[in-house]
Image (tube, coloured by chain):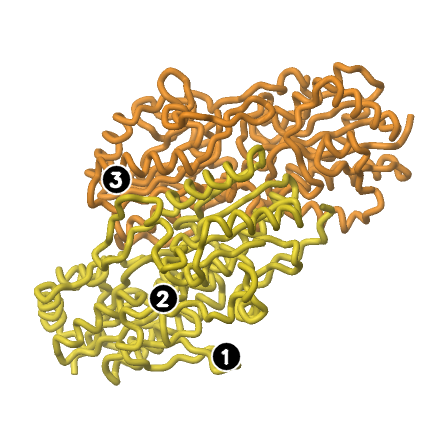
Chain colours: A yellow, B orange
């Protein structure tokens, strides 16, 4: 067996995705002191070109330093290999005499690994999870989610204080195409009924503009202000992206996903709110890419877990192809081998029980999940307002 | 002389505006142990109603704890008093036997103080500066700016790393109606020509869509990606808000300011970029309210300076009406009494020398100013990309 291992990063970045690279590289070297660990630049695209960084040339200290940087430090891609692309990638992995290919990413990345594995080669294809969307099956939570959720919780705390000081209506559009975890995490630090966000709209529950306006009116009447968290992938009752109803043309990326723009949704909602609540202070912002890899906001737990996922991937690749599931045994986070097919192309939605049945709000069950993950709220004194 | 002092907060929040309340209250009590310090709720609106919190009932420790919270903890307002409102406020201040009224805010708040002072009353009207826009005359920089600039610098570092990993065009719309300081602070951590933001558009320099598209094309050719910082108040060559050219109706707030929405600007720019660069990854976000009072992102220096402004206001109010100017003597920040008229209703624009003459970028002079204020960049290792 050769001692060559290839690592790459796919899809969107997180605050801790480089920890997984560091964890895997350090563990491979611990097991195989003469191993070559090649970091492909720009994901599978770099593998196809043989465009590598020799990670095994770095000291453990430099790898840990790299691990502590946010965003995909090796570069990333959303390329979905077709047959020819796939054959090129396998040729290159064979040429490099790679024993295993560890690809860190979401469900699209797992799908790419499934295609490569199906092509057959004496190479272990290990998918290591990451995504701020937290939407991978076989995972309790995914590396990257905790840090992004921390940002979103912080943002909503700030905006709730902002609108306590000067009343009005505030809505922020949060990333999330199908799963509402990140949007819901805006509510993680609510202590009282009067704390914002007062309304949480996620793709898992049908959205109607009429009910939305009525909800906002009711909250304003009760608290004098209304803070709203809304997923950019919020859907109509019949399961169509709400944006489809307000945009005539929709771009699609290589994976066939609708390219959503939170900005478009924000402007449509701002218009509807301004019309329904004339002369009221209305502000709609789009957090966009900010939550996913903000400097200084990598949670310690998230970073350690992402590192451990790398360590586990480096160990388990010796047993062949799989995806790594970051699960929870009721007490702690545990890592398990899971089949690629259980993760690839599938989406874990937020469990129905995470939302209150009678209002657009996170339920006690959802709050307990968030409390277990999201770092503690800052200890502010009670408000004068 | 009575020992009653009234304090209030006006306009938008900052991460450190409560430090000024804490500083003033602690200093007043140090000088006058039996003084009553009344915090008006919701700015001048609370004064008009006699709606106060007794800040002198709090311990120094509780005041410091309050100082360490972001956003306007006493509540705020954008009310601009007319003659009747003004008379009511003065009646209330007289009724409370107030010796001084300290109002923390921007140039609109200073304007309110000028109106109140002109009405004549044996009360000292002291305006204490704060604004994330950094646009007050007679100030080197305003309390609140450093923290907001820190957020914006962090955000652009993150987004530059994001687009290094997966190339494309990214633009963020940043608050700033007339002054580009906050937008320019996105460039504070640039080290090399290739670091984003590659283009910086501020209200101080005329904007044309044609030149903008050409600029973006040039940068993309050079670096394979283009990161752009744009003020929401960006203006056409003839000095009209660019948004006016894309919106038929514009709301105006009580001070006659155009109510800008970064979302509208963002969507217009996104459309123009998508048209000019088909099939290129284009993303436009609006930071909106996020930079101004983000939990955990109050800079230590900013917090200390805002506290000192409060201390100074408490001292100088004994000498009568004025505004407090946070100036710089070439070595350190110094506080001086300045006339209300020098601040009220005026806007300090970014000095012309802060921008490069031949490109949309912060000049060496501008970078030196930002380096003096914005906290240091995180110490990341060199990029592999």
Q: Which mark is residue A3?
A: none
Q: Which residue is mark 1?
A: A332
Query: Quadrant of the rendered structure where residue A202 is?
Result: bottom left
Residue B307, x across and y down, in percent: 69, 39
Q: Which residue is mark 3?
A: B274
Which chain does tag 1 point to?
A
Question: Residue pushed farthest bottom?
Answer: A319
Residue A189, x across and y down, in percent: 59, 59
Secondary structure category for the residue under label 1? loop
Q: At 49% across and 68% down in the image, what residue appears?
A: A301
Q: Earlier in the sequence, mark 2 or mark 1?
A: 2
Does the image show residue B130?
yes
Q: At 66% across and 54% down in the image, what residue appears?
A: A194
Query: Quadrant of the rendered structure where residue A92 is?
Result: bottom left
Look at the picture and state if B25 lies above or below A18.
Answer: above
> Real-space Cα distance between discs 2 and 1?
18 Å
Residue B159 lies left or right of residue B322; in this view the side is left
Which chain does tag 2 point to?
A
Nearer the observer, disc 2 or disc 3?
3
Which chain does tag 3 point to?
B
Secondary structure category for the residue under label 3? helix
Between residues B385 and A257, which one lies in front from this camera angle?
A257
Secondary structure category for the residue under label 2? loop
């Amino acid at each position: 067996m050769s001692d060559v291992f290839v690592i790459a990063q796919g899809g969107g970045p997180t605050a801790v995705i480089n920890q997984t690279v560091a964890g895997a590289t350090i563990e491979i070297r611990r097991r195989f002191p003469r191993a070559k660990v090649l970091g492909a630049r720009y994901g599978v695209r770099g593998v196809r070109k043989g465009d590598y960084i020799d990670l095994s040339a770095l000291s453990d200290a430099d790898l840990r330093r790299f691990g502590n940087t946010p965003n995909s430090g090796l570069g990333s891609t959303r390329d979905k290999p077709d047959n020819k692309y796939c054959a090129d990638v396998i040729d290159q992995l064979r040429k490099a005499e790679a024993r295993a290919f560890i690809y860190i990413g979401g469900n699209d990345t797992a799908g790419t690994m499934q295609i490569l594995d199906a092509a057959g080669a004496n190479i272990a294809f290990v998918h290591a999870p990451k995504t701020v969307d937290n939407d991978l099956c076989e995972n309790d939570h995914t590396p990257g989610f905790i840090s992004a959720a921390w940002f979103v919780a912080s943002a909503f705390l700030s905006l709730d204080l902002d609108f306590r000081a000067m009343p009005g209506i505030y809505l922020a559009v949060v990333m999330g195409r199908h799963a509402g975890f990140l949007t819901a995490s805006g509510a993680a630090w609510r202590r009282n009924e009067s704390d914002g966000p007062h309304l949480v709209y996620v793709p898992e529950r049908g959205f109607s503009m009429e009910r939305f306006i009525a909800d906002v009116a009711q909250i304003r009447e009760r608290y004098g202000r209304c803070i709203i968290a809304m997923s950019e992938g919020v859907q109509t009752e019949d399961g169509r992206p709400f944006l489809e109803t307000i945009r005539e043309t929709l771009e699609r990326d290589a994976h066939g996903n609708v390219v959503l723009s939170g900005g478009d949704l924000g402007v449509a909602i701002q218009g509807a709110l301004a019309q329904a609540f004339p002369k009221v202070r209305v502000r709609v912002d789009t957090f966009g890419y900010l939550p996913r890899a903000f400097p200084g906001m990598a949670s310690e737990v998230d970073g350690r877990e992402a590192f451990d996922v790398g360590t586990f991937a480096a160990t388990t690749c010796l047993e062949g192809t799989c995806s790594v599931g970051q699960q929870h045994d009721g007490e702690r986070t545990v890592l398990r081998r899971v089949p690629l097919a259980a993760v690839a192309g599938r989406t874990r939605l937020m469990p129905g029980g995470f939302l209150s049945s009678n209002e657009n709000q996170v339920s006690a069950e959802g709050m307990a999940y968030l409390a277990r993950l999201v770092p503690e709220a800052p200890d502010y004194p009670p408000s004068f307002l």
